[in-house]
Image (cartoon, grey):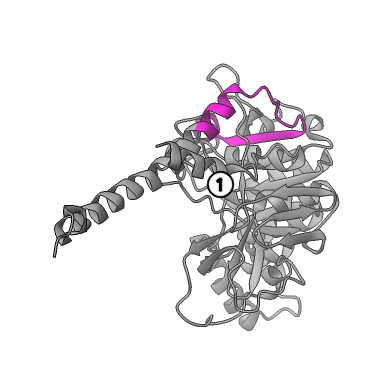
Amino acid sequence: MKSGFWRSDWFLGALVVVAVVFFSRLSELLPSLERKAYDIGLAASSREPHPDVVVIAIDETSLANIGRWPWQRDVLAKMTDILAGAKPKVIASTILLSEPQVDKGYRYVSRLLDVVAKSASQPDGGPILALLKEAQQELNTDAKLAESYAKAGNVLMPMSFTLGLPLGKADARPPDYVAKNAVPGTKLDGGIAALPTRAVELPIEILGRAAAGIGHLNNPRDVDGTVRTEPLLVQHYDQLFPSLSLMVAAKSLNLGPAEITVAPGESVSLGRLRIATGPYLEMNTHFYKVSEARPAFQVDSFYDVYSGKIAPAKYGGKIVLLGATAAGLGAAPVTPVAAAMPPVLLLAHSVSSILQEHFIVAPAWRRWAELLGILCV
């Protein structure tokens, strides 16, 4: 019985190998071309950043004058008080304060306070007890920062999730001061609507309760190590938590988590703003042009504001973002417009993208174009 060589096992096997190699390379090629097109599109864009978004940077000048990091938190409390007096729309910090700051002196003062309180012969404890109480209050920098946050009433803080599909059930539900930031009313029914997470690092309770809101600060990298997208929400078991940028945008519009609505796989809406997203509610952030001579956003030194060199009135009605830019103070990932961008500047680009609807949207006909590309190749 005759049969052509194309029917032989070796030929069919070779054909399968070639097809697998071809399509695997093509599957890598198309996303790579998309990333290149995205970067080129940003470089060609003339869009301007939101004029009300300003950054106060913990930079080298601030470290040289105030001292090495981490600072005592009463420094952050004083800065919060300075800014709050100018009545900005929002104050958002990218500094994750997940552990209490307990000065050694505070521990000893607290122990002495107990001893004196138990042994004092005078009804009111006398001047020594009064002095110890004053010292205890002065050294409790977490309490001072929490008081400043509460007085300001518009301070937002970050939390950080560990991305990944959880293997089981949560050990415990997030505390109420965190849970109140979740988007209500979204029916997940055991499905995955956003990037899943299996753990979370939270701000300490005294600060979290005093803050006006908490948002996540996760910025996943693409395969080439560049940040191009931001998950506007992440899924922690059966709850969706907004990004810090989405919380900042909401607060600046006098909105909150209750005004965030989700169309899984399609979009996130904030009031009348509709943000088209990818399948896991990720936004293609618009990164504005930067240069050494002209940063995209107004960036002021923490020390210049703290010392009074810059008048706080400058920040009235503004969206103030506070965070570290000095080298060595946290990771600074690559973006399409910068070889290293600290989280506070990433936040600025994202907030501006949301408020001005400058995010990049993949067209509906993209898949057809990809198919055409495959056929042409």
Along the line of sight, the residue nearer the viewer: 177 or 127? 177
Span highlighted in magenta in the image: 37-65
Residue drawn at (71%, 74%), measured in percent from left and top? 187
Q: Quadrant of the C terminus?
A: top left
Q: Secondary structure at mark 1?
A: helix
* Residue under label 1: 367
Residue 248 drawn at (x, y percent):
73, 49
Q: Amino acid at mark 1?
A: Arg
Does 106 lie within the magenta span? no
Residue 42 falls inside the magenta stretch: yes
| Residue pictured at 70% horizontal, 33% vertical | 54
Q: Position of residue 269 (x, y in %)?
A: 77, 54
The spot of residue 108 in percent (x, y) is 52, 67
Using the rendered image of the protein, determine whether residue 136 is visible from the camera's viewpoint.
yes
> Image quadrant of residue 44?
top right
Q: Closest to the observer: 24 or 377?
A: 377
Tell me which residue sits at (67%, 40%) in the image: 359
In the picture, measured across the screen, residue 85 lies left or right of residue 42, that is right
Asked which quadrant contains residue 175, the reply is bottom right
* Above/below status of 37 relative to 148: above
